[in-house]
Amino acid sequence: MTRLLPLALLAGLVALPLALGANPYLLNALIVTGILTIGAMSLNLLLGFTGQLSLGHIAFFGIGAYVSALTSLGFDVELGFGLRAVHEPWPPVVGFLLATVAAGACGYLIGRLSFRVRGAYFVIVTISFAEVVRLVALNWVELTQGPLALTNIPAFTLGLPGLGFWTLKSKLQNYYLVLAVGTLCYLLIARLVHSRFGRAMRGLKENESLALSVGINATRTLTVAAVISAAMAGAAGSLYAHYLRIIDPDVFLFATTVTMVIMVVAGGKGTLMGPVVGGLIFGLLPVALRPVMAPEAQWIVYGLVLIVILFVLPRGIVPGMAARLGRRPARSAPVLEASPAVPQ
Amino acid sequence: MSAILSVDHVGVRFGGLVAIADLHFDVREGEIVSLIGPNGAGKTTAFNVMTGFLKPSQGEVRFRGTSLKGLAPHAITRLGLARTFQRTSVFPDDTVFDNVMIGLHQVGGRLGRAPVLDALLGRAGAGERQLRARAAALLDWVGLSGRMHEKAGALAYGEQRLVGVALALATEPAMLLLDEPVSGMNASETRVFVRLIRQVRERGITILLVEHDMPMVMEVSDRIVVLNYGRLIAEGPPDRIRNDPAVIEAYLGQGSSARQAAKSAHGSAREPVHA
């Protein structure tokens, strides 16, 4: 059952463009939703499985977008002291890999910096980090073009030597690229969560003292989680840059982090499917509402839907539905609901 | 036998409050030693110092000749010194089986050299199977096989204690610190637990015990160390401690529940006392 649901969803998403035809407006919404959902899945690795809230998650996403864009565009920057950094354009696929590595490295730094103290400190460090990165993107005009935006970012080119190359310019191609990367991220997270490393994360979240006492290194475990989470967000950012083919410092908007947090919390944090379900609902809700109401009213409905979801299913849609359907609750379920009467 | 754990003139102060004034004792290899004393005597504080959860203001703890100064709790566990906790002894949202799997963290680390990489590449198969077999064996050994698939947080208090012991044993320790393991257990559960402690010792694991249940302490200990107001007031085999005037004084001076504890320490009442 738990294995069937994601597979059914995947099959549905694969078939969706065939059923809809190539409606560019809808495809665009699906692609952006898919990219944000990958961001939400990466955030869930931290927020859901370790309990650490990264409110600057968009920084890793934006770093991925800029690193990938600059790698594929090339740059020529004066560094001062007579030093110049010149970079010739590389293929976007290399940009994608570098974006993942660079975002992961930032995740490592943030993790080392804040996981000795954790909790509120991590939240503050991540917010500040996102703001600093945004200001750099805005003000280092020579490198990033500042508010003028980086334009003409090349689209992804995939190919095998001997078989030919495809430049993914159409929406349909990008849709399947995002779906493939998203599926890969889902599988990676599923793997991690059910491994020894995932057990260490769960242990730390449920009872930190006890986890330490069985030999789990808290700082290291959380830092590794932050690295993987940040790298995944960076990958999503790279997809974003090469799909839109233009990025400006607005990719660092705090509101996008909030959207990801809403996707995770509404869908069910600490579950594999939660961010996917939450991501699809909150990514596509504006599309559904657009024909019937003005944009201002849409945001009100957006907020109402969130309130209703959290009111009816406080633990999120996925764990809530699982409990309603009478199955065993998901891993992160509080004990209260799950307790059978214990014979003495 | 040589000392496996030496508490060397340890003192702990929280601001002006002296939790432990000057604690000095050894535990020898293969012994079962109990640390007793009225509430607030500093027993749990002493445990927290030994396991790295608290830094002592003075003195140091040595385990198998290694100073534990400055070591984090997880590093101390890796040296072979494991503990249980007084209150929260389980990972409440996981099944009993998964609890032990989390506890097998270190063993799992030895089986696979790069755990995160193994997990990502899906190489963990053989190691995981070994871990699962071990977890099942351990649960069988502490008598929780029947509860394997239940949420640990939903178990009865006494059973949660057993999960705590299984978790500590999962780290393959040379020495085990038990913090009030039988509190919340009834008389028959306590008897079963005493048998378990003896079996743990037969496996070559040294045991240091903090406990309020005097009959249990008297029955199981080779040696007893008595603390009061952060100081060591007596040390010796159960028979000597039972009749030690300083010990009786310490307990009688503490109000009715402690008086009862002192009485039961003399063997007149055999029911457990939770002072």
Image (tube, coloured by chain):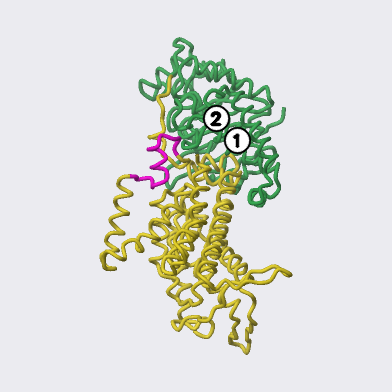
| Count of numbered circles on the image | 2
Q: What is the secondary structure assignment of the residue under circle 1?
A: strand
- Read off the magenta span: A313-329
Q: What is the secondary structure assignment of the residue under circle 2?
A: strand
Q: Between B99 and B171, which is closer to the camera in this rendering?
A: B99
Please rate how many residues cluster around mark 1, counting C-alpha atoms within 10 Å: few if below 14, some from 14 to 19, many from 20: many
Image height of A229 relative to A82, above or below: above
Q: Mark 1 — on which chain does it sit? A: B
Among the chains pictured, the one given green colouring is B
- Dot 1 corresponds to which residue? B82
From the top left corner, tell me how far across and down residue A288 is, in percent.
34, 61
Residues under labels 1 and 2: Cα distance? 9 Å
- Visible in this render: residue A308? yes
From the top left corner, tell me how far across and down residue B141 is, in percent.
61, 23
Q: Between B26 and A279, which is closer to the camera in this rendering?
A: A279
Residue that lies at the very extreme toward the top in this rendered image: B268
Residue at x 66%, y 34% (from the top left corner)? B172
Which of the 4 quarters of the picture holds residue A100? bottom right
Q: Mark 2 — on which chain does it sit? A: B
Image height of A306 relative to A253, above or below: above
Please rate how many residues cluster around mark 2, counting C-alpha atoms within 10 Å: few if below 14, some from 14 to 19, many from 20: many
Dot 1 or dot 2: first in sequence order is 1
Residue B269 is inside the magenta segment: no
Residue A316 is inside the magenta segment: yes
Amino acid at dot 1 = Ala
Image height of A78 relative to B105, above or below: below
Residue at x 47%, y 44% (from the top left corner)? B13
Residue at x 28%, y 59% (from the top left corner)? A301
In the rendered view of the protein, which quadrant contains the N terminus of chain B? Answer: top right
Among the chains pictured, the one given yellow colouring is A
- Dot 2 corresponds to which residue? B178
